[in-house]
Amino acid sequence: MPESHNSDNALCRDHDKRVTGIEHKIETSKEAMGDVKKLLNAMSGKIDQLLEKVARVELLEQRHNNHQAEIERAHNEIKDAKEDHTELAKEVRAFMNFAKGMGFLLYAVCGAVAVLMVKVLFFTASKGMTL
């Protein structure tokens, strides 16, 4: 019996070692789980920050696109205004040339009338006529 008693003690010691090993592994696992939870909480905070930054970038990108569209629209309006200005400038130049021509024509007609009046006065004076 002593032999079986020794083998029983050896089995008990092996069993106790296993239980102690398992308990140690459980404690280590609990510590690791705590560390993992801390890491997940930290990562959750970082992920929240990243999501905020992504939302901010998306908002800035949308504003940029809106500004680009507004700038393009403004450039088109400027281009249209420039074309209208060019057409108006051509019309104004044509009117100014017409007005200059009319003024020259008016001076020419007035000059011709003045010359005719002088001729008539001299013609009547040379013929002895008085007005």
Image (cartoon, rainbow, N blue to C red):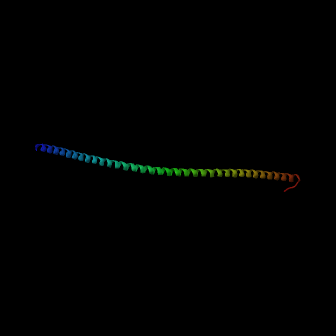
Q: Nearer the viewer, residue 127 or 9?
A: 9
Q: Which residue: 42% across, 49% down?
A: 54
Query: From this viewpoint, which residue is outermost toward the right?
Result: 127
Q: Nearer the viewer, residue 38 or 22?
A: 22
Q: Is residue 55 left or right of residue 117?
A: left
Left or right of 124 in this view: 104: left
Q: Of 123 and 11, which appears nearest the observer?
A: 11
Outermost residue on the bottom side: it is: 131
Q: Residue at x 60, y 52 (%)?
A: 80
Q: State which quarter of the image contains the N terminus.
A: top left
- Residue 7 in the image: x percent, y percent? 15, 43
Q: Position of residue 77 (x, y in %)?
A: 58, 52
Task: Give the mark count.
Answer: 0
Horizontal placement of 49 versus 85: left or right? left
In the rendered image, which quarter contains the C terminus?
A: bottom right
Front in this rendered view, residue 87 or 6:
6
Extreme residue in the left direction: 1
Where's residue 67, x and y in %?
Answer: 50, 51
Residue visible at 70% across and 51% down?
A: 94
Image position, residue 120 (x, y; %): 84, 53
The residue lying at 37 percent from left, 49 percent from top is 47
Q: Is residue 27 left or right of residue 119?
A: left
